[in-house]
Amino acid sequence: MSACPSDHASAPYRICAFYRFMRLDDPDGLQTAIRSRLLEGRMCGTVLLACEGINGTVAGLEGDTRKFFRWLQDRLGPPALNVRESWSGHAPFKRTRVKLKKEIVTLGIDGISPIEGAGTHVKPEDWDALIEDPDVLLIDVRNEYEIEVGRFRNAISPGTASFREFPEYAASRLDPARHRKIAMYCTGGIRCEKAAAFLEKSGFGEVFQLQGGILHYLEKIPANRSSWEGECFVFDERTALNETLDPGQYDQCHACRRPVSEADKQDVKYIRGVSCPKCHDQKSDRDRMRYAERERQTRLADLRGDVHIGPGSRANPAVRKAGPKPD
């Protein structure tokens, strides 16, 4: 991957966003097996399992992640998982979660399944030519707070706070008779799979989606030829990635998990670990006290050189099994 250094001494954590729509006959059994493998490899992140497939983002040292995905691919069988990778100098997640869900990406409408395929996948190398077509309506299917950080030029924001709101947006603002060509994109591609299946079932004829999402585009397209503007929000402690897939200029509010800019930090409503201008008025005094205590405990752990939560934490069963932390 051209955006990453040839050796990862300065960025040893491999972060893998992956998904696959498929029929899972035994999500419960797979949940137990995946959790065991992640803990054994001291990997953190979140994996979602449903009858419709698997979706997750996990991180760990390179050898451990490659071993895990070899095992997972063998367990699931062909075709290959859709995996996008990036790198970090720090563990981007604090916990290991494997959850059973009704949907691996929640649209909230029964009968919408991309298992058999939906929409036309467009390679990053062909994406810009498609979206420059004046007959193509370009839609960013992510949430509004993600779009504020960065987007493709001339993309339309549905103004949604969650993916569940996309069907309502489509019903009220899109028309199969007028919008004959629709192109969509999201972070890693999974939301577009569901959105494309929904639009095709709703009567829209030509629906295109960016293969591998924004992350794949930034990996493949040099910045001097890119139509991407800004940074790409990601759901981990890096908050946003720049055009070379390195951590960008945003931090994350630990109260609401939304991106925080340098301008936000100058606001009186920004308190590190407690609130930001976007959520301050939505939280109670009790909430802020709880967040403040969490932030205090995290800082104390940092001062001790300890890990409050995360891959090296004593809360990780694999760490407890390995024995005491060496001096």
Image (cartoon, rainbow, N blue to C red):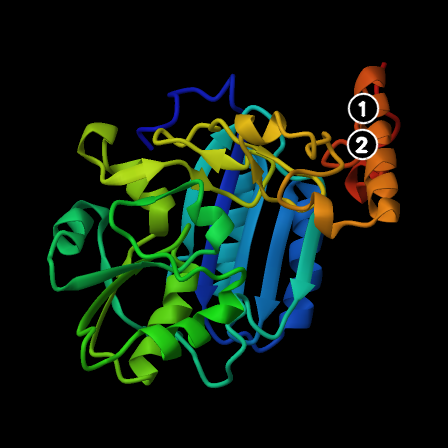
| Above or below, comparing residue 81 to residue 179 in the picture | above
> From the viewer's perspective, is 59 left or right of 132?
right
Q: Quadrant of residue 149?
A: top left
Image x and y of residue 277, in percent: 64, 39
| Above or below, comparing residue 282 to residue 209 in the picture | above
Image x and y of residue 116, in percent: 35, 77
Instruction: Tell me the element at label 1.
Output: helix
Residue nearer the viewer, 231 or 63: 231
Q: Quadrant of residue 137?
A: bottom left
Q: Residue at x 12, y 50 (%)?
A: 129
| Above or below, comparing residue 65 to residue 211 in the picture | above
Q: Amino acid at mark 1?
A: Arg
Q: Residue at x 52, y 70 (%)?
A: 164
Q: How many marks?
A: 2
Q: Quadrant of the C terminus?
A: top right
What is the C-alpha distance between the residues marked 1 and 2? 6 Å
Q: Quadrant of the N terminus?
A: top left
Instruction: Tell me the element at label 2.
Output: helix
* Residue 116 in view in this figure: no
Q: Residue at x 82, y 50 (%)?
A: 284
> From the viewer's perspective, is 33 left or right of 171?
right
Q: Amino acid at mark 2?
A: Glu
Image x and y of residue 301, in percent: 84, 24
Q: Crowding near pointer 1: few (<14 within 10 Å), some, many (20+)?
A: some
Dot 1 and dot 2 residues touching (CB under 8 Å)? yes
| Above or below, comparing residue 112 to residue 37 in the picture | below
The residue at which mark 2 appears reads as: 295
The residue at which mark 1 appears reads as: 299
* Residue 126 in view in this figure: yes
